[in-house]
Amino acid sequence: MRADRLVSLVLLLRQRGRLTADTLARELEVSTRTVLRDIEALSAAGVPVYAERGRHGGFALLPGFRTELTGLNHDEALALLTAGTGRGEQVFGLGSALASARRKVVDALPEGHRATASDAARRFLVEPETDLLSRRPDPEEVPGTTMIEIRRAVLVGHKLRIHYAAADQQPQWRTVDPIGLVTVRDRGYLLATRAGADRTYRLSRVSAAEELPEPAQRPSQVDLDRVWRERCARFLSSDHLAVLIRVNPERREELLSTAVAVRAAEPEADGWLRLEATFQDLRHAEWALWQLSTDAEALAPESLRTSLRDRAAALAARYGASS
């Protein structure tokens, strides 16, 4: 909404001083032309914005200007709550709302506390892109308009129509009753029911969504953490193979991309990682471990170790020295 953007523009100028139109456009995720129109609107409304020409010019507010512009809207409050539980700025389409909310929170602080709070915030880093063992996988993208429809249906409690592409299937329209949204390792999921049966949909596979006017058939209260644990347990125990693996950390991402699921990794004394991975079946596990060559070792089950050993022996025999 334009009103929220004008508030954010004023707060940016108050907190950071003189800024160019290009910088404001990047911060507000709009075009430079939109910023210039917003500056004109603020001036017409009596906000003392002035332009400084030259190489180091930009827009600024007259010194001492202050107005009460710190009311949080619904999405901004939701963004702050989500951000408190993880990488909320990158999920559920709340990035710009979170940036705006942070500006309002800083602006609401007493004058003498703002610099201290801003400096303290720079002293903490939560879930960076790179950790000590490997680079995090890139977060999956969901179209903004699609995410808005999904998020609104979840919060309001309406049925949701999604255009979803299941693995190895053509996209189809499905009408579901949304329960909640979950993000794990930068992957987002929609928890829902369909015709009374539990369903879990990967958000990156939803190409379009439409909130419907009918109320969703779902409990009024939900323990989302418990629901997620139960669904994970059912998924991992249903026709899947759990494998205990040692892997070179440099090949960890390859393993993540081929396994159905990977539990938390524990570093060993030699720098390798010990983890539990889930595969579709023995054949899938054998294929995935074979791709990693000597950079991985299956510790269990014994049937997988046997199949890998037999495969390696057959290959060695095939390329052995000719008599």
Image (cartoon, grey):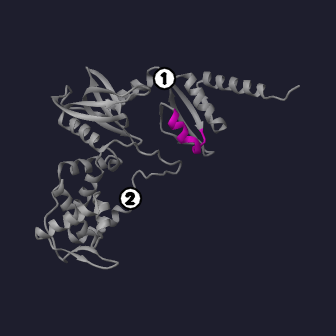
Q: What residue type is labelled 1?
A: His
Secondary element at image label 2 = loop
- Residue furthest bottom as drawn: 54
Against 218, residue 137 (above or below) is below
Q: Which amino acid does label 2 sit on?
A: Phe
Give the class, few, some or many, for how many residues have Cα within 10 Å of label 2's Cα (few <14, many ≥20): few
Q: Name the residue under label 2.
A: 124
Question: CB under 8 Å between callouts 2 and 1?
Answer: no
Q: Can residue 106 be seen in this view?
A: no
Q: Can residue 173 be seen in this view?
A: yes
Asked if the stretch drawn in magenta spans residue 253, the answer is yes
- Residue 240 badge: 1
From the viewer's side, name the closer residue of 189 and 244. Answer: 189
Give the class, few, some or many, for how many residues have Cα within 10 Å of label 1's Cα (few <14, many ≥20): some
Give how far apart the Cα atoms at labels 2 and 1 are: 39 Å
* Position of residue 301 measured from the top left corner of the image (x, y, whole percent): 58, 24
* Position of residue 171 measured from the top left corner of the image (x, y, whole percent): 36, 28
Taking the image as shown, residue 240 lies to the left or right of residue 322, namely left
Asked if the stretch drawn in magenta spans residue 137, the answer is no
Mark 2 or 1: the one toward you = 1
Question: Which residue is rendered at x = 19% and y = 77% of the image?
Answer: 62
From the viewer's side, name the closer residue of 150 and 170. Answer: 170
Question: Which residue is rendered at x = 13% and y = 68% of the image?
Answer: 67
Taking the image as shown, residue 299 lies to the left or right of residue 231, namely right
Secondary element at image label 1 = loop
Taking the image as shown, residue 186 lies to the left or right of residue 43, namely right
* Magenta stretch prevailing secondary structure: helix
Q: Quadrant of residue 181?
A: top left
Magenta stretch?
Answer: 247-258
Against 125, residue 172 (above or below) is above
Question: Which residue is rendered at x = 58% and y = 33% of the image?
Answer: 245
